[in-house]
Image (spheres, rainbow, N blue to C red):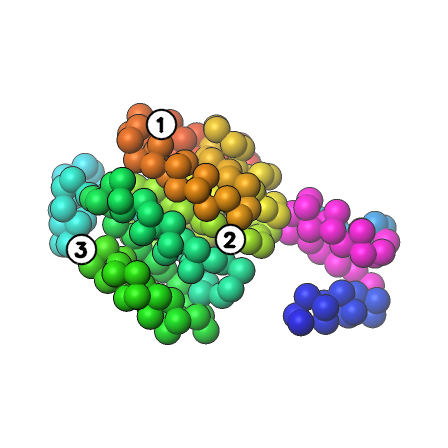
Amino acid sequence: LIEAVNVWALRFVDQITVHCEETRRQTVARGFPTARLKTLICGFETQAVVLSPHERLTRRRAMGIADDQLVLINLARLYPEKLQDVLLRCFKELLEHCPQARLWIIGRGPLETALKALCRQLGLDRTVTFFDWVDDLPTLLLLADIQVHPAAMEGVSLSIGEGMAAGLPIVASHVGGMSEVIHHGHTGMLVPPGDAHGFVDTVLALIHHPEERQRLGTAARHFITHDLL
């Protein structure tokens, strides 16, 4: 319904800014004149946080993460298009192969109650943690190991930018403007939308190859801190 209202409202505006090239193509396809379109990629303000290996380990232990456990993190509002329900089902499958995995979901939204109920239904209460608010996001991201983002719709995601700035390897759906910041196999991994098994397999591959996680995370941080300047 919101999408339909947006398309209808376009006829009454003089200028549109779009936040990725894919959105620009979609807007042109709806008949909006290219002369009145400007691409304005979203930016974000983040802070450089550094944790020593010892401090990182200590902070993880304080949050109940054992030394042999690996944390996946999802940072997105709790709305249908972010597909946290699919993520929970993927995580249940992933646990069958990697029982030491843990999942942190950070976000607020109207699906919070339903998602927590699904988490209980799937028997994931002990392995999934929901955060509705985080005071120090850059530091929390440094405590995670892989960022997961199976969204069905996306532009240039600010949460992905935050994860890249933190040097996280990222597995995300190949939708919207994601490929404009995540270069598959270089600054992260992109999975076709709707491919839940492919998503699980890609995450598992990173879990089992820490050197690949390091390579992707380093390239992601460099892209944010150098390539965009």
198 left or right of 105? Answer: right
- Residue 55 is labelled as none
Res. 99 image quadrant: top left
Badge 1 amino acid: Glu
Q: Nearer the viewer, mark 1 or mark 3?
A: 1
Q: Earlier in the sequence, mark 1 or mark 2?
A: 2
Q: Is residue 143 visible?
A: no
- Is residue 29 on the magenta stretch? yes
Q: Earlier in the sequence, mark 1 or mark 3?
A: 3
Residue contact at pointers 1 and 3, CB within 8 angstroms = no
Q: CA distance from mark 1 to mark 3?
A: 25 Å
Q: Which residues are magenta?
A: 13-33
Q: Residue at x 25, y 61 (%)?
A: 123
Q: Residue at x 48, y 28 (%)?
A: 186
- Residue 212 is labelled as 1
* Residue linked to disc 3: 63
* Residue linked to disc 2: 151
Q: Residue at x 35, y 66 (%)?
A: 118
Badge 3 amino acid: Met
Between 217 and 151, the one lying in front of the other is 151
Res. 126 image quadrant: bottom left
Residue 31 in the image: x percent, y percent?
A: 85, 56
151 left or right of 55? Answer: right
Residue 206 in the image: x percent, y percent?
A: 35, 33
